[in-house]
């Protein structure tokens, strides 16, 4: 049997301490035909040299050097250069099980779908496994696009492209949005129902996320407020418009998603940024106030969500000041659970 080539794209930036582990797990894949594309996104340490060394030692590794443009930019270059019929994406500080891509390809063949995904876990710097963000199914499950989208909007699904194997033609003339965080969610929801009608989800935790402070999704500014919270709100509005057009039955779920993302934004924005000069913050507060009645009647918002919504609609800055004073109290801990 002639297996199709899988191209595994790895954006790389100042990661020389962790890159060898990542590359090693890709080199050990049991799937017989892979190429590994290391895209050096303008590293300023010795990461670029390390990539070149890997490329010299293993003919399956192709190395590209580019000006720094972010993870999405590096991925997009990898997509354009990939020779494979299927694409995989791995973050350079993460690592995978040796049979991950073999299992993903076998699932795609068995179920006749363009995308398969495995479960993942998160590992802290001490090697401890963190609580699951996404719980994989007990057995392989083929999920229709509308149901998969609903799971994403209920914060139960996995939007990461790193846990997936995808047919390359699905991404023809499509790219990861550059200059944004949570870019995987943005691209995936746009593909669902249009180019991806079903996804098979496997029970195995084949992908291991290394939870490292300083990586893109956890990068914070001097006030410890990541851009990802604002980008999440923008993505929520984008997906609400998409749902209205393509999945009208999910409008209540999409509305719930938008409220949840705004509450999350309000829980993380520094108090010093909660002022009249912050236009985005004012828009979030205005939305919560205008949509309070609708939120209180939404069956997909929990009681805790509705309490937070009400508090932030009434006195957003006052609630955050109180939060700072009471964040170690028993009552506040129970509310956050």
Image (cartoon, rainbow, N blue to C red):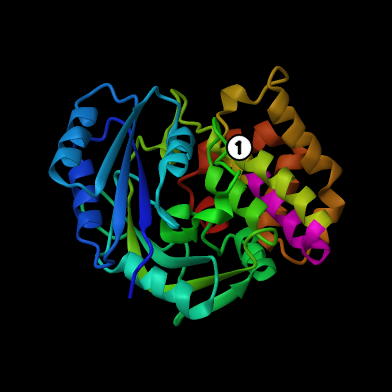
Of all residues, the one furthest to the top in this rendering is: 277
Q: Residue at x 48, y 67 (%)?
A: 116
Q: Which residue is mark 1?
A: 231
Provide the secondary structure element on which disc 1 rests. Answer: helix
Q: Residue at x 50, y 33 (%)?
A: 226
Residue 161 percent coordinates (x, y): 47, 54
Nearest to the observer: residue 79 or residue 98: 79
Q: Is residue 259 magenta?
A: yes
Rendered view: 65 above or below 229: above
Which quadrant of the rendered structure holds the N terminus?
bottom left
Q: How many marks?
A: 1
**How many other residues sit within 10 Å of disc 1, few (<14), some (14-19) or many (≥20)?**
some
| Magenta-colored span | 246-263
Residue 183 percent coordinates (x, y): 55, 42
Rendered view: 113 above or below 215: below
Q: Is residue 190 magenta?
A: no
Q: Is residue 234 left or right of residue 77?
A: right
| Residue 87 position by quadrant | bottom left
């Amino acid at each position: 049997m002639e297996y199709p080539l899988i191209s595994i794209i790895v954006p790389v930036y100042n990661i020389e301490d962790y890159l060898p582990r990542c590359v090693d797990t890709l080199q050990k894949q049991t799937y017989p035909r892979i190429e590994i594309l290391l895209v050096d996104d303008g590293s300023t340490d010795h990461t670029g040299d390390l990539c070149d060394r890997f490329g010299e030692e293993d003919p399956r590794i192709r190395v590209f050097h580019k000006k720094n443009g972010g993870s999405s930019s590096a991925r997009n270059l990898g997509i354009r250069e990939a020779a494979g019929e299927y694409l995989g994406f791995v973050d350079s500080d993460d690592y995978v099980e040796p049979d991950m891509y073999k299992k993903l390809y076998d699932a795609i063949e068995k179920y006749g779908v363009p995308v398969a995904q495995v479960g993942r876990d998160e590992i802290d710097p001490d090697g401890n496994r963190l609580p699951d963000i996404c719980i994989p199914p007990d057995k392989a499950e083929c999920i229709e696009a509308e149901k998969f989208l609903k799971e994403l909007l209920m914060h139960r699904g996995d939007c990461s492209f790193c846990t997936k194997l995808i047919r390359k033609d699905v991404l023809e003339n499509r790219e990861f949005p550059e200059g944004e965080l949570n870019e995987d969610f943005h691209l995936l929801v746009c593909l669902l129902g249009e180019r991806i009608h079903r996804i098979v989800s496997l029970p195995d935790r084949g992908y291991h996320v290394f939870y490292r402070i300083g990586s893109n999704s956890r990068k914070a500014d001097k006030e410890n407020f990541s851009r990802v919270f604002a980008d999440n709100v923008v993505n929520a509005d984008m997906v609400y418009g998409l749902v209205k057009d393509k999945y009208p039955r999910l409008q209540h779920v999409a509305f719930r998603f938008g409220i949840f993302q705004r509450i999350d934004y309000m829980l993380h924005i520094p108090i010093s940024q909660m002022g009249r000069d912050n236009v985005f913050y004012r828009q979030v507060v205005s939305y919560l106030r205008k949509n309070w009645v609708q939120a209180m009647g939404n069956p997909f918002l929990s009681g805790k969500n509705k309490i937070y919504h009400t508090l932030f609609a009434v006195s957003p800055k006052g609630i955050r000041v109180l939060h700072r004073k009471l964040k170690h109290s028993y009552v506040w801990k129970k509310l956050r659970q």
